[in-house]
Image (spheres, grey):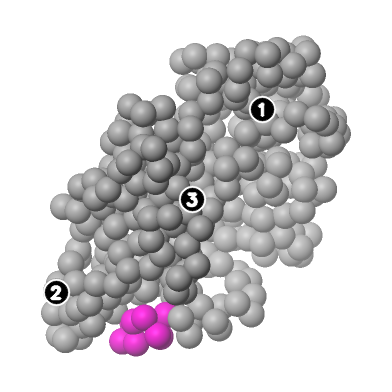
Amino acid sequence: MAEALQAAAQAGQRVEVRGAGSKQRMGAPVQGAAVAVETLGLDRVRQYDPRDLTVSVEAGMRWRDFCALLAEHRQMAPLDPPCAETGTVGGVAAANLSGPRRRLYGAARDMVIGMRYATVDGNVAETGGMVVKNVAGLDIHKALIGSFGTLAVITVVNFKLAPQPERTRSYALAFDSAEKLAARRDAVLRGPLQPAALDALNPAAARLMGLEGCCLLARAGGPEALLARYDHELAGAEIFEGEREAALWRAVEEFAPQQAFVVRAGHKLSDLKAVLESAPGPCVSRAGTGVSWLAFESADAAQQWMLDPAHGGWSRLLEWSSGPAGLYWPDPGPELEWMKKLKSAFDPSGILNPGRLYGRI
């Protein structure tokens, strides 16, 4: 991989970097690439000792195969990314994907403890390691996470793992308004029990999941005594277990890739009601972390929503797109200049995935 990047750089050719291609609709298209490189040939397990709760795998390994490997030892990397069936480990990290259980377990930057990566000058470098509390060097892997292959090509990813809970159970509470849903969400957040996932669906999104009304979804895991307490605290909820539970969360996790155009909005927890009510179509919200996904039928409709002054207090970007769009990230903020400096340090000629980071880098 490093040799391929160096050859392209020396020839002045732009390079498109991808894994399985499952997230080509995410971010923005690569602009003017002459060479394409894929990571699928990098699919080995480098190091795995279940007793240490750490693993190192190559970036081209399919996420589903990675999860199956961990499940053999009742362990997990609970990122719950979309495109889990076809995507790769490196793609999950490069796109900074996470899902409903982010509230309890964190995102990729919390689980990834090290990487190897190939650079445009033909080198292979390492960052972090195989221990959870590693204080040596710079956390360069945290910059590579979410970079969409615009800085370097991730070749190996090291994770800290979590044990699978003894049992899991999920709950769906239905309401006739976003206001009532938000009030119940607030009560859950103030309560003694803290579910691993806490998602909100507006009525349009709920119908996609086979539910009705404004729905608050909660996912809990642990011994039966703990789940019985959830049964009591969430009395009146529809209960999901086994394959029904797995199917429900797969539908939630795969919501964005199934829509034509999807805007991701970051907002305060107190803005949940406003976000749900502002959505003209289906909307799924991480109700415990303040991130929402709003679906639109066209790029124009998505951009009009993003540019509406009423939504200016929220971070907004067009995360998934079925076709060309003129504007992916309307207001990246002052951090964009630092991102450009980082891009220049890693890739001074600008040949890696140009435009891939929402049209900005």
Disc 3 to disc 1, C-alpha distance: 22 Å
**Mark found first going from the N terminus, 3 or 2:** 2
Q: Secondary structure at mark 2?
A: helix
Residue at the spot of label 1: 218
Q: Is residue 354 above or below residue 72?
A: below
Disc 2 to disc 1, C-alpha distance: 47 Å
Q: Quadrant of residue 156?
A: bottom left
Disc 3 to disc 2, C-alpha distance: 29 Å
Kind of residue indicated by mark 2: Glu
All told, the count of numbered labels is: 3
Residue at the spot of label 3: 111
Indicate left or right for 181 with 246 as reference. Answer: right
Kind of residue indicated by mark 3: Met
Q: In percent of the image, x 41 and y 27: which residue is there? A: 74
Residue at the spot of label 2: 3
- Disc number for residue 115: none
Q: Secondary structure at mark 1?
A: strand
**Mark found first going from the N terminus, 2 or 1:** 2
Q: Which residues are magenta?
A: 343-350
